[in-house]
Amino acid sequence: MSKQLVLMDHDGGVDDYLATMLLLTMEHIELLGVIVTPADCYIQPAVSATRKIIDLMGFSHIPVAESTVRGINPFPRMYRRDSLIVDHLPILNQRDIISTFLVAEPGQDFMIRVLRQAPEPVTLMVTGPLTTVAVALDKAPDIAAKIAKIVWMGGALNVGGNVEKSLEAGQDGSAEWNVYWDAVSAARVWQTQIEIIMCPLDLTNNVPVTSDIVCQIAKQRHYPISDLAGQCYALVIPQDYYFWDVLATAYLGHPEFYQLREWETEIITTGQSQGRTKVVSGGRKIYAMDQVDQEAFYNYILQQWAR
């Protein structure tokens, strides 16, 4: 049976690296490349860490590309500095040379090329803002026909957002960060006919990173991938942290763990609700991950990282 073609676009947060690791364990997936969007990270260490992770997992033939897009509302520095920490983890720095290929062209151009050259439509796995996708679509509208669907971690439909009012003056607390970084680009993608399956905060809020699950990962640390996952989660355990990107990515491995629900929505691009994904009658139809078998999900990631 032919493998599912996937192109990943992440933005360098701790859970983005973990989502990349999970995707690389899926034997039914052919990963065509990884694009790093400069949002929840400092881009150079984020690209470096991504390449080192791919090396560690033995997939150095998979190319990495650095997107050069820019957002509207920067992620907080405290979030972005995690890319520096991950890039310096000992397990990722045992070799002097990074083998995974870094393409010369910008990530948005790499996306266009990969989609045009693919023999069949490709699933975009996006765990950061939609800006790179939007820019690629503006430059090459024909690629829309080569996108099978977009699986995206982003948005908050019927719960509050995670853009804190105390940190972002003038905001009402309804926005989710991957939308808020560049709501205009999210709205651009909403204008297409591409199928969108989103993993919103409505679901991720129910799947926290707990001390128990981190300790279970630690018991597998004789496996290099579990060791790396445990080190990454140890960085964020003092925070309220959830399986945002990993939960979204696991959908590609076991969609039967999830229940989807259709919503009519719009992206708010201005004002106090900038970055909100609003449920509105007659809006753009999307599918949202509505429920997940939490136990099956936890067991799955433990199993996949035991290598």
Image (spheres, rainbow, N blue to C red):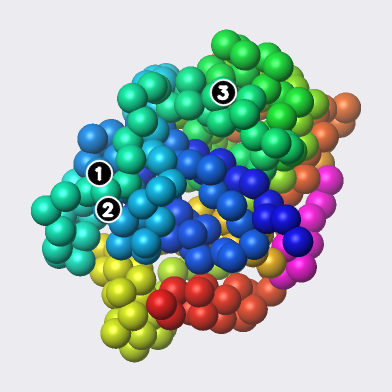
Q: Position of residue 137 (x, y in %)?
A: 62, 18
CB atoms of marks 2 and 1 within 8 Å: yes
Residue at 41% of width from left, 48% of height from top? 61
Where 105 falls versus 152 (above or below)? above
- At label 2, the amino acid type is Lys
Q: Which residues are magenta?
A: 255-262
How many other residues sit within 10 Å of disc 3, few (<14), some (14-19) or many (≥20)? Answer: many
Instruction: State the residue position of label 2.
Output: 52
Q: Position of residue 292 (x, y in %)?
A: 69, 67
Which callout, 1 or 3, points at the residue further toward the start of the chain? Answer: 1
Q: Position of residue 221 (x, y in %)?
A: 30, 82
Question: Which quadrant does the C terminus fall into?
Answer: bottom left
Res 128 seen here? no
Side (left or right) of 217 relative to 182: left
Side (left or right) of 86 relative to 179: left
- At label 1, the amino acid type is Ser
Residue ranking furthest to the left: 96
Instruction: Please identify the quarter of the rendering in which residue 155 is found.
Output: top right
Residue at 15% of width from left, 54% of height from top? 88
Distance Cα–Cα, label 2 vs label 1: 6 Å
Instruction: Please identify the quarter of the rendering in which residue 185 is found.
Output: top right
Residue 202 magenta? no
Residue ranking furthest to the top: 139
- At label 3, the amino acid type is Ile
Instruction: State the residue position of label 1.
Output: 48
Tag shown at residue 112? 3
Distance Cα–Cα, label 3 vs label 2: 24 Å
Q: Position of residue 96 (x, y in %)?
A: 11, 53
Residue at 55% of width from left, 24% of height from top? 113
